[in-house]
Amino acid sequence: MGWFVEDGSISMGGALLVLFCLYMLGTRILRLYLFESTGPSIARPIVQVVVLGDIGRSPRMRCHAISLADAGCQVDLIGYVDTAPGSRVTTNRYIRVRPIQSAWSVPEGMPRLLYLLWAPFKIIFIGCQLVYIMGAITQSPKFIFVQNPPAIPTLMIARIVATLRQAKLIIDWHNFGYSVLGIKLGMDNKVVQLAKRYEQYFGKRPYAHLTVTDRMHRELIDWGVSGRVITYKDQPPYHFARLSNDKIL
């Protein structure tokens, strides 16, 4: 037969066929168990709100999570829990906080070389957690809200998970990650320029974009992004109120 040689051992073509079948089977199992819904289905649409920062210090993303829950969604709020997220999050039955373990950061004032050497390990540590939480232990979302920055590795992972789980990706642009990196390394640094191209590539084709300023809105249009771009400016929290004259004086 064509798949075997005269001594009965498998031929090169047969070996390649076996490897191809194992590859197809392995990728199918990976997609089935890592990137398809887990657990019983529920009536509410599921939304992932991802903030690669402290949830307790991210009022805008908490507001997104609360508003989505009030609108009839089941929310997975993913981020660091260094401070309490607030009672409106923790007592809401439709918001589930999915904590990320923060990685050690290079202290301010240290040499740039140390920052560059440590950055890949930090990215891998955080990225593995994001893949596990967004792609494995949560049910398939209908939408994924991602705060940017940081862009690395959030945008890449969010786009991959959104594609594999057939979710619509929405990026909430607070700033540009490459410009924040440029403050430390200088805008002419090759790493910063590479980060800019990365951010433009993975941030170009989401379902929609939210920006905090009109200028950022125009910048995204200049990038040629697809999807609707909406300027959604920050609002004061619900408990803020105008001071009376007595309190001012």
Image: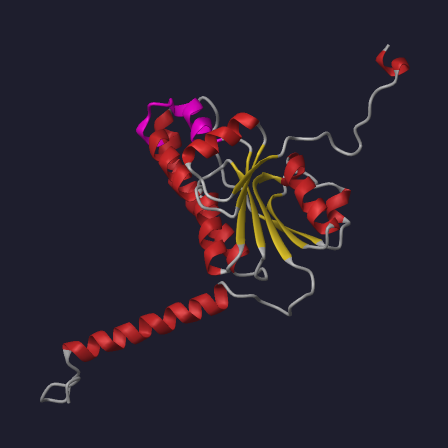
Q: Residue 247 occupies which quadrant of the picture?
A: top right
The quadrant in which residue 102 appears is: top right
Taken as a whole, is the magenta stretch helix, strand or loop? helix
**Quadrant occupied by the C terminus:** top right
**Camera sees residue 106:** no
Foreground residue among 97 and 60: 60
Q: Which residues are magenta?
A: 176-191
Q: Left or right: where does residue 46 sit relative to residue 248? A: left
Q: Is residue 134 above or below residue 23?
A: above
Residue 211 part of the magenta segment: no
Residue lying at the far left of the rendered structure: 6
The image position of residue 51, as x and y in percent, is 57, 42
Nearest the eye: 165 or 95: 165
Position in image of residue 50 (x %, y %): 57, 46
Q: Residue at x 74, y 32 (%)?
A: 237
Taking the view exactly as shown, the residue that stands out farthest to the right is: 246
- Position of 14 with respect to 213 (left or right) is left
**Residue 141 seen in this snapshot:** yes
Q: Residue furthest top?
A: 249
Q: Position of residue 111 (x, y in %)?
A: 38, 24
Q: Is 197 placed left or right of 105 in the picture?
A: left
At which x and y percent is residue 142? 58, 57
Which residue is found at the position 48% from the left and 69% from the top? 32
Give above or below for 20 relative to 196: below
